[in-house]
Image (cartoon, rainbow, N blue to C red):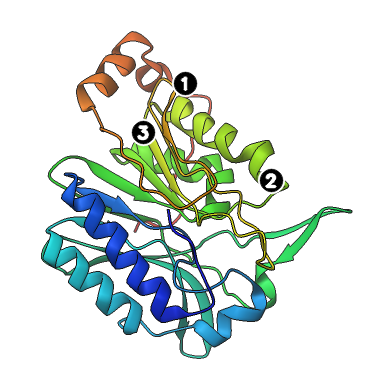
Amino acid sequence: FLHVSKVKADNLSRAHNLVTEAAGQGAKIVVLPECFNSPYGTGFFAEYAEKIPGESTLLLSEIAKENKIFLVGGSIPEEDRGKLYNTCSVFGPDGNLLIKHRKIHLFDIDVPGKIRFQESETLSPGSVLSMFDTPFCKVGVGICYDMRFAELAQIYAKKGCQLLVYPGAFNMTTGPAHWELLQRGRAVDNQVYVATASPARDEAASYVAWGHSTVVNPWGEVITKAGAQEEVVYADIDLQYLAAVRQQIPITTQRRNDLYTVSAVMDS
């Protein structure tokens, strides 16, 4: 959960320090915010875009390796063959790239008098579902607007994910209205943990992030939440508790698969 400025080197240095701090406190999986290396906005994506591997992701690989953690690298603007993507790279404790999640659902919204934003003016959508294994649990990854699409979370849960992570940057209109609500909804619907990481709020930025990085448990309770400013928040992912919730309210086995189903069109 970090303050993002227009100076990429500062953003990378800050990310390095905060991830190291989190690992020093015993964190095994660390999540950075969406667009952690550049300001968020269609006017910035091309200027800050990198190939993967590139400056930012090579640093993430080093940080993961030196701290022996799983690092969900928020997201960066990625350039690949003339197209731009909003991309999350995940690295293992050995520094290897595990997955690369390109934001599937582009943030194209128009709330009259409040906010209009069109990611599709500059970005292309990804088309792959992204999961990775850890010794602790399987993790599903989405970016920001992906969280609004319940089907994605349902498929991840169906494929065995017990933790869903969404680096995101909701704004001052959608943040107070839906940020926590969506996380709690995804958690309760699927009886999983949901973690989000947002940039800290910068009132001077062209796009003002809501902040409030959060972790929600499978009962739908917020177990940790940041404020609007830069800080590191921690939560324990308790799989025994998750199993207990699923046993108490066994929706997984009570689904009417004879009536309806949600499934992936393409296996990833």
Q: Which element carries disc 2, helix, strand or loop?
A: helix
Outermost residue on the right side: it is 113
Q: Name the residue under label 1.
A: 256
Q: Name the residue under label 3.
A: 193
Q: Which amino acid does label 2 sit on?
A: Thr
Is the C-beta separation of discs 3 and 1 under 8 Å?
A: no
Sequence-earlier tag: 3 or 1? 3
Spatial CA span between label 2 and label 3? 22 Å
Q: Position of residue 141 (x, y in %)?
A: 38, 52
Front position among marks 3 and 1? 3
Left or right: where does residue 196 sit relative to residue 117? left
Image point 26% across, 33% down: which residue? 237
Q: Residue 53 carries which label?
A: none
Q: Name the residue under label 2.
A: 174
Sequence-earlier tag: 2 or 3? 2
The one nearer the camera, 252 or 165, is 165
Q: Quadrant of residue 33?
A: bottom left
Task: Work out whether 104 lies above or below 48.
Answer: above
Specify few, some or many for label 3: CA neighbours under 10 Å numbering under 14, 14-19, or 20 or more: many
Q: Which amino acid does label 1 sit on?
A: Arg
Q: Which element carries disc 3, helix, strand or loop?
A: strand
Spatial CA span between label 2 and label 1? 33 Å
Q: Which element carries disc 1, helix, strand or loop?
A: loop
Q: Where is residue 131 in the image (x, y as percent from the top left)?
A: 31, 53
Spatial CA span between label 3 and label 1? 24 Å
The one nearer the camera, 191 or 28, is 28
Specify few, some or many for label 1: CA neighbours under 10 Å numbering under 14, 14-19, or 20 or more: few
Image point 28% across, 23% down: which residue? 242
